[in-house]
Image (cartoon, helix red, strand yellow):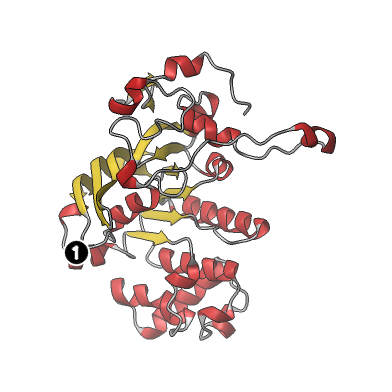
Amino acid sequence: MKNHDARPLLEVSGLGITLDTHRGPAQAVRDVGFTLARGETLGLIGESGSGKSITALAIMGLLPESAQTQGSVRFDGQDLLGLSDQQMCALRGHRMAMVFQEPMTALNPVHSIGRQVAEPLRLHQRLSPGQAREAALALLDRVGIPQAAQRFDAYPHQFSGGQRQRITIAMALACNPELLIADEPTTALDVTVQQQILDLIADLVDERGMSLILISHDLGVISQNVDRMLVMYGGTVVESGSTQQVFDHMAHPYTRGLLAARPQIAGVANAARTHLRTIRGTVPELVDLPPGCPFAGRCEFTADACWSQRPQAREIEPHHEVRCLRDVALAAADPVPA
């Protein structure tokens, strides 16, 4: 693990988010807390609906107007949840930026890609049109857009999916932000392009000294790209620690289930006899989450108390926490192969 500035850039404490749904209010995020040091990389992992993306949207000030929040999100000591839209606009794209999972919806189809990359430079850094164009060309070249000068006035639909994602990364990095959030940045890309995008983000984070929050549902992506990780389920962080700690000692049934569900490369003869393990059931709707552990019912270790008693975070080794009433029984179970 790299050495990082000990001063926290981001401090999330007791974050709760309630959304209006057609079935009534639903807690999308429940008591989430973590810190992120300057230059540190953090992964959020879990199935769709676990609360990863909405946590990121809360940090960026992009929640729906009807959303109700509690707790605090402090960026460089300033609580973001109390800021006005105008104050958040001054931070977004300048000191904090986000790469979304679908670049075609993140890019404006009626504006050229050059104009879109140059816009934050003109808005936040007050560059002239000529200076912004020069800086935008340098960014497009850095993220690997071929013939950037010739394609500066082209439109998003004229680029491939991988190239569009590179353009959104260039937009996010235009003002050299201190925090970059990448929300499933390789969705819908083929495997080769996925790795190129992840390598590009890692290189840029390293050379610019940014803090990174990487959101994914893939344990392999998280294991190779972040220093620390939070495993989320039902809007709750069920396990957290350094990436090495969590992979060496998976203490929550959900974390183990995610790893066990990953396909393993094996010989043809072995593959024919190997059954892919799955987590039984499906992620419940937010309004149907039990009052106790959100994983109750899908977990093979579920006991009566799990339905009604909400687990508290417990440190099982320095900086490695788990929320589980049955972690002792889990420790005695068969280990999951790494």
From the top left corner, tell me how far across and down residue 194 is, in percent: 61, 57
Crowdedness near tag 1: few (<14), some (14–19) or many (≥20) residues, C-alpha within 10 Å: few
Q: Determine the residue positioned at 58% across, 53% down.
A: 199
Rendered-image quadrant of the C terminus: top right
Q: Determine the residue positioned at 16% across, 63% down.
A: 84
All told, the count of numbered labels is: 1
Most foreground residue, 100 or 281: 281
As shown in the figure, which amino acid type bears the numbered disc 1? Gln
Q: Is residue 180 above or below residue 223?
A: below
From the top left corner, tell me how far across and down residue 289 is, in percent: 33, 39
- Left or right: where 189 falls relative to 106: right
Most foreground residue, 22 or 38: 22
State the residue position of label 1. Answer: 87
> Does residue 86 appear in this view?
yes
Secondary structure, mark 1, is helix
From the top left corner, tell me how far across and down residue 76 is, in percent: 25, 48
Residue 302, located in which quarter of the rendered image? top left
- Left or right: where 288 falls relative to 108: left
Q: Is residue 106 above or below residue 259?
A: below
From the top left corner, tell me how far across and down residue 308 is, in percent: 28, 27
Q: Determine the residue positioned at 57% across, 34% down.
A: 259
Q: Is residue 9 above or below residue 157?
A: above
- Left or right: where 121 falls relative to 67: right
> Does residue 75 appear in this view?
no
